[in-house]
Image: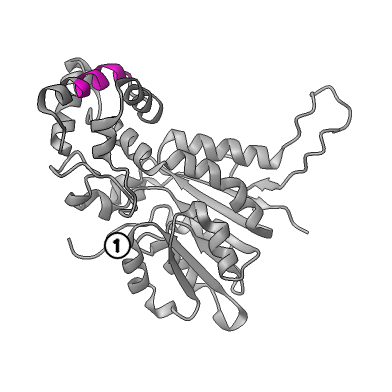
């Protein structure tokens, strides 16, 4: 496949809510193909100190972003790293505070459509699903080495899969019969055989939840997100904004609860006349309800359908 193709989701809404300042410093923690970053960079003025830092753990994304953002090379720094390391990256660049941070947590179209990456149940490929191919844990290791109890837990928690136990049991059975499960189609067939016919006819592809769950486990997606939010919020300058686009309920719940806690951290009993816990608000939630894609965007990009954007603003001076 030529190039890193990824259609940026909720593009206009994200740029508007980031409230870009021409002399600001911004970090795109999941730069992908550079779609969001391109629009951020257009609004920055390097002669006034405007600067953009792009992070991604995918080597293909890094190359694509650098190519797309060539016109803005004077204000751009791209680093191959997971956004969980954002504070360390900022420190290495001599940056103490930033005016905005963006995370687009979706799997890119390139990753889904690149057969050899093994993200999709629509193509027969080796089980992989690593966003960062320097990592050792792949879908192959999860499917072939995890015990039944752990497979069940992952499918239930990360895929919200009703038939998690059936699928895990059948994975173990096939492992014992064949020795190993090598491909995405082999895994897809196991899932399809584990789910009742009436359920398969009711909704989307029966393997979708299983593939999501294993991908989340391989890339530690929920842990990385949870471990990053405090650090990113503390990295914001007064009035700076953190914008996060999620694509499933597990991510969205983490972001929603964290933003709520940052705005109202007090843990005193509600009948206390004054706060005595000493916890101070970090700012305010800009999006009381998540921003959703328009009907037009969903028609043009079916992968935007589950997207939700939430934005938090750091407390002003």
Q: Is residue 164 magenta?
A: yes
Q: On the rendered image, what quadrant is the C terminus found in?
A: bottom right
Numbered label tally: 1
Left or right placement of residue 156 versus residue 196 in this view: right
Instruction: Farthest residue to the right: give it.
Output: 273
The residue that label 1 is drawn on is: 60
Q: Residue at x 78, y 39 (%)?
A: 279
Can you see residue 187?
Answer: yes
Q: Is residue 60 magenta?
A: no
Left or right placement of residue 261 versus residue 167 in this view: right
Magenta-drawn segment: 162-172
Secondary structure at badge 1 equals: helix
Q: Residue at x 35, y 50 (%)?
A: 297
265 vs 294: above or below: above
Q: Residue at x 68, y 46 (%)?
A: 284
Q: Position of residue 265 (x, y in %)?
A: 72, 37
Can you see residue 18?
Answer: no
73 vs 170: above or below: below
Instruction: Farthest residue to the bottom: give it.
Output: 47
Judging depth in this view, the residue of 140 and 74 nearest the camera is: 140
Q: In terms of image quadrants, where is residue 295? A: top left
Q: Residue at x 17, y 60 (%)?
A: 1
92 vs 151: above or below: below
Q: In terms of image quadrants, where is residue 4? A: bottom left
Q: In terms of image quadrants, where is residue 306? A: top left
Instruction: Farthest residue to the left: give it.
Output: 178
């Amino acid at each position: 496949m030529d190039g890193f193709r990824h259609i940026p989701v909720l593009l206009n809404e994200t740029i508007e809510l980031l409230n870009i300042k021409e002399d600001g410093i911004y970090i795109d923690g999941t730069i992908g193909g550079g779609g969001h970053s391109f629009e951020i960079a257009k609004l920055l003025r390097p002669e006034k100190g405007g600067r953009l830092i792009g992070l991604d753990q995918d080597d293909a994304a890094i190359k694509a972003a650098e190519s797309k953002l060539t016109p803005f090379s004077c204000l751009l720094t791209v680093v191959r790293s997971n956004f969980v390391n954002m504070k360390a990256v900022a420190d290495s660049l001599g940056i103490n505070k930033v005016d905005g941070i963006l995370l687009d947590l979706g799997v890119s179209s390139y990753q889904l459509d690149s057969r050899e990456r093994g993200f999709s149940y629509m193509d027969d490929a080796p089980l992989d699903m690593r966003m960062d191919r320097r990592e050792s844990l792949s879908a192959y290791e999860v499917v072939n080495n995890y015990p039944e109890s752990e497979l069940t837990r992952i499918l239930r928690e990360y895929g919200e899969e009703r038939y998690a136990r059936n699928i895990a049991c059948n994975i173990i059975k096939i492992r014992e019969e064949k020795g190993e499960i090598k491909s995405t189609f082999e895994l897809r067939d196991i899932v399809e055989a584990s789910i009742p016919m009436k359920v398969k006819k009711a909704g989307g592809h029966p393997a979708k939840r299983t593939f999501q769950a294993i991908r989340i486990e391989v890339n530690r997606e929920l842990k990385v997100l949870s471990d990053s939010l405090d650090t990113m919020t503390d990295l914001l300058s007064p009035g700076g904004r953190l914008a996060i686009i999620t694509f499933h309920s597990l991510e969205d719940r983490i972001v929603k609860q964290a933003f709520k806690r940052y705005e109202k951290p007090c843990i005193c009993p509600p009948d206390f006349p004054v706060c005595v816990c000493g916890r101070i608000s970090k700012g305010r939630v800009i999006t009381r309800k998540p921003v959703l894609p328009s009907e037009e965007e969903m028609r043009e990009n079916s992968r935007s359908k589950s997207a939700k954007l939430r934005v938090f603003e750091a407390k002003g001076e």
